[in-house]
Image (cartoon, rainbow, N blue to C red):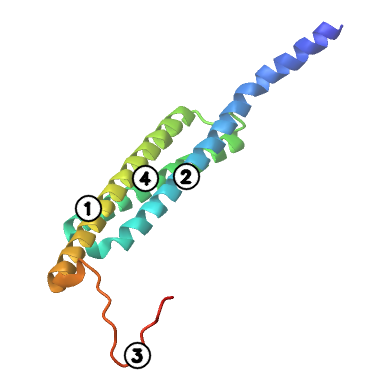
Amino acid sequence: MVWSKIVQVFSLGSQWGDNTIRLIEGENALKMVQRVEGILEDSMRVLESHERVMSSGEFNAFSIKHRHLVLKVVEVKQEVHRDRNQSVLSGNPVGRGTDRIVRDVVRLQHQAEIYQQDVLTASRRAQDHEEETFMKRYLEDTPHTMGVRLIPLPDRPQPTFS
């Protein structure tokens, strides 16, 4: 008798297990898309802060890629929501297209991570170039700044050390 109850619980678990796992996959897909949005927001913040030190061609190329990725994010989000709504309305398990959506989300996250690395690398390079150029100009304008000399002012009394 106890064994039959355990078997019923497990058979119920397997009956609902696939649906539950798929539902969790759907939630994970949405969370992954939200992470991608965060990656893109961070990347754009870095990109915009380096706009004036990057070449316009490089900045424009990154901006175009960003818009492309944002569009993909919106499309994938729509797919996830459409898949969830369809499964709720039809009563079928979540997503005939769930595997495809998960693959799309994983691919999108990978593309966003690569994009972010490229933006960070280009921003560091532009920043390093800006600092190098600044230091070069600064040193050319003030050639005696290599050593620091203290020159006493004539109208002030000098401190005495005992």
Residue of label 4? 72
- Foreground disc of the pair 4, 1: 1
Vertical order, 109 against 134 (above or below)? above
Other residues around mark 1 within 10 Å, as few (<14) / some (14–19) / many (≥20): few
Q: Are marks 4 and 1 in contact (CB under 8 Å)?
A: no
117 versus 52 height, above or below? above
Q: Position of residue 105 (x, y in %)?
A: 42, 37
Q: Looking at the image, which residue sits at the far right?
A: 1
- Using the image as rendered, state which of residue 100 and residue 157 is in the foreground: 157
Residue position marked by numbered label 2 in the rendering: 35
Locate the C terminus and report the quarter of the image it occupies.
bottom left
Image-based side of 57 in relation to 109, left or right: left
Crowd class of label 4 (few under 14; some 14 to 19; many from 20; radius 10 Å): some
- Kind of residue at disc 2: Arg
* Disc 1 from disc 3: Cα separation: 59 Å
> What amino acid is found at the position of numbered circle 1 in the picture?
Ala
CA distance separating discs 3 and 2: 62 Å
Query: Residue beneath label 1, please?
Result: 61
